[in-house]
Image: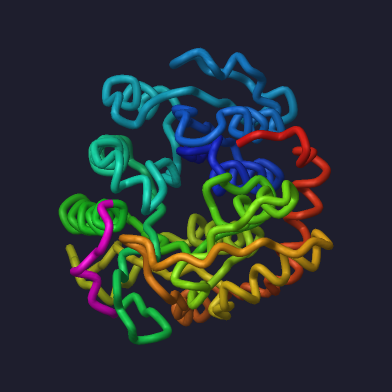
Amino acid sequence: MKILITGTAGFIGFHLAKKLLDRGDTVVGIDNINDYYDVNLKYGRLAETGINRDAENWHSPVQSTKYPNYTFVRMNLEDREQLMQLFQREKFDKVCNLAAQAGVRYSLENPHAYISSNIVGFMNILEGCRHNNIKHLAYASSSSVYGNNTKMPLSTSDNVDHPISLYAATKKSNELMAHTYSHLFNLPTTGLRFFTVYGPWGRPDMALFLFTKAITQGKPIQVFNNGNMVRDFTYIDDIIEGVTRVIDSPPSQSSLGGTRGGLSLYAIYNIGNSAPVPLIEFINAIEHHLGKTAIKEFLPMQPGDVPRTEADVTDLVEKLGYKPNTPVSVGIGEFIKWYKQYFKPDSYRV
């Protein structure tokens, strides 16, 4: 199977590419390697899959030195002409769109980046799929679409019409756009609402990375909402297992409607651990694995943030056999081990 994965210099995209390559799929990865966070981490991920620094060059395919079935191209999703040429040339079977401008708080400062990447870029992905006989488009949505919903656990049947950040609004827009293309053009699409993904090679702007770096350097960590936060932290291996199952299983039913010819080709799943953990317990696990106590700076809730997340993953369990099973204590231990080995905390700078 030949699969296009967007965002393969990113956290989830890197792990997904490696998983699919290891099982024998042919993968073409694209990423714009932007500087939202340290590009050296992105190049480090690419290097793990055999993509050298030639990836700095735009629009030039780079062949992996580790995987004969992996090619990488540096590209913006907004570059419609280049993206369409890639679709026509490579003749993909399936697409997994993980590229996006991420971050809730960053969207308060740089809103235009979210419209360009998450709306215009996703539109171009949909058009590429529509015109090139793609058998299934899986794409990243986010648990942020639930906004301030207080009913727990959060279910895909819940109302998500009131996002509280621009990032969340763009992800909800992606779901609506995908629904339209499934309805009009018989394009099978599946959206994945990710819940707080963490693990080795994670993003430096996420809590686990920020806390680990600060604690190792003896600096204070910022604990928002005075520590009264609960998150459905989900380990990267569990996420990748779920995403892989989704890619392999194009939808044939949908609770949201959108049928054509008696068949509905649109689906949305939560993908989380379904075992929420208080933020203080999360911090305690980091302290345990580092052998150091954090200096905590308690702060109020940040704009666009929510106090609690908890995923109802019943649909994914029942339909695809998805069973997340990595406890936070184990996942944090794996992250700390990787962090110490790879980044050398005293010298690494984010």
Which residue is pictured at 69% across the width and 28% down the height?
Answer: 47
Give the percent coordinates (x, y) of residue 106. 37, 45
Instruction: Work out whether residue 216 or residue 234 is closer to the camera in this orientation and state it.
Output: 216
Q: Main secondary structure of the magenta part?
A: loop
Which residue is pictured at 44% across the width and 36% down the height?
Answer: 92
The quadrant holding residue 245 is: bottom right
Which residue is pictured at 34% across the width and 66% down the height?
Answer: 267
> What is the count of numbered marks?
0
Considering only vertical position in the picture, is 54 above or below 217? Answer: above
* Quadrant including the C terminus: top right
How is the protein colored in the picture? rainbow
Q: State the extent of the magenta-drawn residues as a range.
A: 158-166
Residue furthest bottom as drawn = 151
Instruction: Work out whether residue 283 or residue 266 is closer to the camera in this orientation and state it.
Output: 283
**Residue 186 seen:** no
Which residue is pictured at 41% across the width and 63% down the height?
Answer: 193
* Quadrant including the N terminus: top right
Q: Is residue 183 magenta?
A: no
Instruction: Work out whether residue 322 or residue 157 is closer to the camera in this orientation and state it.
Output: 157
Give the percent coordinates (x, y) of residue 305. 37, 64
Give the percent coordinates (x, y) of residue 276. 55, 79
